[in-house]
Image (cartoon, grey):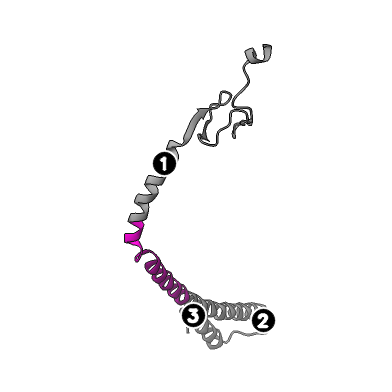
Amino acid sequence: MSRMGEKVAYLKGLAEGLGVNAESDQGKLMLAMIDALEAFAEKNAEMEARLSELEQYVEEIDDDVSDLEEALFSDDDDDDDEDDDEDDDDDDEDMDALIEYECPHCGTVIFFDEEAFDMEEEHLCPNCHRKVFEEDEQDDEE
C-alpha cells in the first residue's frame, strides 16, 4: 500500500473510532471526503504502477538505441575518415566549376555552373525573382 493509501486508511479508522455519525450533515460530509480520498489513493497507486512499468520500458528502449548506435557508428569509423577525404576532393572540384555572381537588384550571391551556363537563357535571382543579367540599353538602341 502506498503512503497515500495508508493515510486514507488511518483517516477512515479515525472516523470510525470517533464514531462519526453518517446521519448528521457533518458526518456525511466527512465520510464522503474520506471515500473520495480513498478513490484518489487507489488511482494514485495505479498510476505509480504504470509509471514504473513505463520507466522500465523506456530504459529498455534506451539500451536498444545505444546498441544500434554502437553497431552503426563504431564499425565504420575508419571507413568514414577515408570517405571524408575523398568527399573533400570532390567538393573542391565542384567549387572550381561554379561562377559566383551578385544580383544587381538585391545583392544576393548566386552560383552558376560554369560548364552549363548559357548567357542566352533568362537567369532569375532566387531572392527577388528579377533578371540577373539585364540587356544593356545600348544593345536595345542599335
Alpha-carbon distance for marks 2 and 3?
Answer: 24 Å
Residue positioned 36% across, 57% down in the render: 80
Question: Along the polypeptide, which appears first: circle 1 or circle 3?
Answer: 3
The residues colored magenta run 55-81
Q: Secondary structure at mark 2?
A: loop
The percent position of residue 22, horizontal first and vertical second, equals 65, 85
| Residue at mark 1 | 93
| Residue at mark 2 | 24
| Residue at mark 3 | 7
- Up-down: is 12 above or below 65? below
Amino acid, disc 2: Ser
Residue positioned 33% across, 55% down in the render: 81
Q: Nearer the viewer, residue 20 or 87?
A: 87
- Up-down: is 2 above or below 72? below
Q: Secondary structure at mark 1?
A: helix
- Up-down: is 82 above or below 23? above
Alpha-carbon distance for marks 1 and 2?
Answer: 93 Å
Is residue 71 highlighted in magenta?
yes
Q: Label 3: few (<14), some or many (≥20) within 10 Å? A: some
Amino acid, disc 1: Glu
Residue positioned 49% across, 75% down in the render: 54
